[in-house]
Image (cartoon, rainbow, N blue to C red):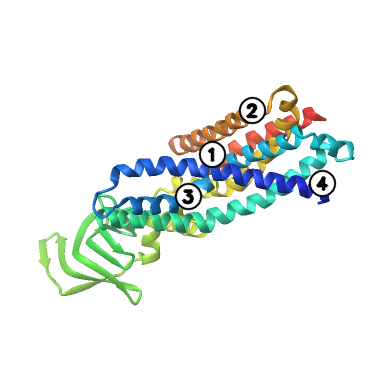
Amino acid sequence: MNRLSRYIGRQVILGALMALLVIVALDAVFTFINESGDVGEGGYTSLMALVYVLLQAPRSAYETFPVATLVGALVALGGLAARSELTAMRAAGLSIGGITRAVVITGLLLAVGAVALGEWAAPAASRLGQDLRARSIGGGSAGIGDGGLWLRDGPRYIHVARVREQTQIEGVRVYRTDGGRLSRIVTAERGRYEDGQWLLSGVEVTRIGTDGVRVSHPDGQVLEAELNPELLGLVALPPELLPLPELYRYIDYRTRNGLETVRYRLAFWVKLATPLATMVMLLLAVPLVLYVRPRAGAGQQIVVGVLVGTAFMLLNRLLNQAGVIYGFPPVLSAMAPSLIFMVLAVAGLQRLR
């Protein structure tokens, strides 16, 4: 990149970060207002609600990253156009293709930032925030509602009422089937993970056979299952909060146990589509600035950008939900909005030539 391209890139990055900060701040305010309704429940205080909101900020930034980059790029490039800097650059020999290349390279840098945010900062912070909130309100763990947690491990169906920590569970029920018939029920007051296995205590075993039902109360029992604390943490969280490697591992677990994977595969592809969406929004900013601005004021241009970004978010959510309901391929549901807007961006650039 030459000096002019680097200058354009810096302006776009600064504009994107400022827009992201404003959007995340507004979302944090509304989230805190919403959380205020739960303040006072259990040990959930206003300070804890504020901590929870701050920990959810990286996730909010990741989800709104493409729209923020579009608005920020429009503000940055629009400012350059308003000060006639783009005109001077073009007079100095920088073509529309050169401006587009500078924006695309900047998009690559921002896409790397989006990946880092979505894979490390957002999942860890959101997981910690949800866990703190759940413990403050009800003493349980994030993702465990009043109905507890259901898991499947081969021929066994496992129900966990409460997760105190990833290595401590309470209210355990294990239903085992043989040939489609319920053959045994194991209930335990609590379980503790040690040395690669779950040690159950307060156990009652009910065996159901052709000769009747037999109940026994052993001192303890070992639960031999694929379930481990790491997998338990994945099960208890929504797919949107899982990094790609963990999400892939959990999809594999559900596939091997014959469980539904559509939501998780969709979340996987949505995560892969977010960096692409970031670049597409930046690419779209170029024709919006160079084609729309001469025909509209700066304020109108920003409004157009916000409307385009909102349309992208709505289309993205619509296709994602439609994919789950109607069984569209997850890769198509996740990638289609970015591809559609990429076609619009390329068409807009062609009109400038």
For this view, does 214 lie left or right of residue 279?
Answer: left
Tell me: residue 166, above or below residue 270: below
User: Tag 3, which secondary structure?
Assistant: helix
Residue 283 occupies quadrant: top right
Q: Position of residue 349 (x, y in %)?
A: 76, 32
Position of residue 40 relative to residue 166, above or below, is above
Q: Mark 4 — residue?
A: 4
Indicate which disc, 3 or 2, sits on the residue closer to the N terminus.
3
Q: Earlier in the sequence, mark 1 or mark 3?
A: 3
Earlier-in-chain disc, 3 versus 4: 4
Identify the residue at the far front of this view: 83
Q: Mark 4 vs mark 2: give the one in front.
A: 2
Is label 4 in a helix, a strand or a loop? Answer: helix
- The answer to whether any part of residue 37 appears in the image is yes
Q: Which residue is mark 3?
A: 57
Task: Report the front residue among 123 and 15.
Answer: 15
On the image, numbered disc 1 is attached to which residue? 333
What residue sits 81% from the left and 51% below the top? 1
Which residue type does callout 2 highlight?
Gly
The quadrant of the image that shows the C terminus is top right
Q: CA distance from mark 2 to mark 1?
A: 33 Å
Q: Of tags 1 and 3, which is closer to the observer?
A: 3
Q: Earlier in the sequence, mark 4 or mark 1?
A: 4
Q: Would you identify the image quadrant in which residue 171 lies?
A: bottom left
What residue is shown with label 2?
Answer: 299
Give above or below for 181 relative to 99: below
